[in-house]
Image (tube, rainbow, N blue to C red):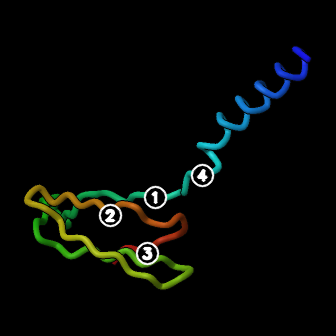
Amino acid sequence: MKRILVTILASVFVFLVTLDDSLAQATAQISGTARDQSGAVLPGVEIHATQVETGIIRDAISNETGSYVLTILPIGPYRLD
């Protein structure tokens, strides 16, 4: 009886440890800095990221330091415009 209980508890433990990974959804992030040809930062630039496979477009605007971040993107190839 004790051996069965240990086996059941070990199985539940393994299930709970792997459960978190199986429920996680994969997402991506694109970040960068908008710069001109001389290397100066460009604030207020519209950044368009198009997912190649679906055509869905996500937009961002660079901040005062030229930085932008696009978060929670579905995994896949993107084209930046």
Instruction: Residue type at mark 1: give it.
Output: Ala
Residue drawn at (60%, 52%), measured in percent from left and top? Answer: 23
Q: Secondary structure at mark 4?
A: helix
Nearer the observer: mark 4 or 1; the answer is 4
Tell me where residue 16 appears, x and y as whole percent. 66, 36
Nearer the observer: mark 3 or 4; the answer is 4
Q: Is residue 65 left or right of residue 14?
A: left
Tell me where residue 61 appears, x and y as whole percent. 19, 70
Q: CA distance from mark 4 to mark 1?
A: 16 Å
Nearer the observer: mark 4 or 2; the answer is 4
Instruction: Residue type at mark 2: give it.
Output: Leu
Q: Residue furthest left?
A: 64
> Mark 3 near mark 4, Cβ–Cβ under 8 Å?
no
Instruction: Residue type at mark 4: give it.
Output: Leu
Residue at the disc numbered 3: 79
Q: Pick whichever, 64 or 3, lies toward us.
A: 3
Q: CA distance from mark 4 to mark 2?
A: 23 Å
Dot 2: within a 10 Å radius of its alpha carbon, few (fewer than 14), some, or many (20 or more) residues? some
Q: Secondary structure at mark 2?
A: strand
Dot 4: within a 10 Å radius of its alpha carbon, few (fewer than 14), some, or many (20 or more) residues? few
Residue drawn at (59%, 43%), measured in percent from left and top? Answer: 20
Which of disc 1 and disc 4 is earlier in sequence? 4
Tell me where residue 71 appears, x and y as whole percent. 35, 60
Residue 23 - label: 4
Which of disc 2 and disc 4 is earlier in sequence? 4
Residue at the disc numbered 2: 70
Q: Is residue 57 left or right of residue 36?
A: right
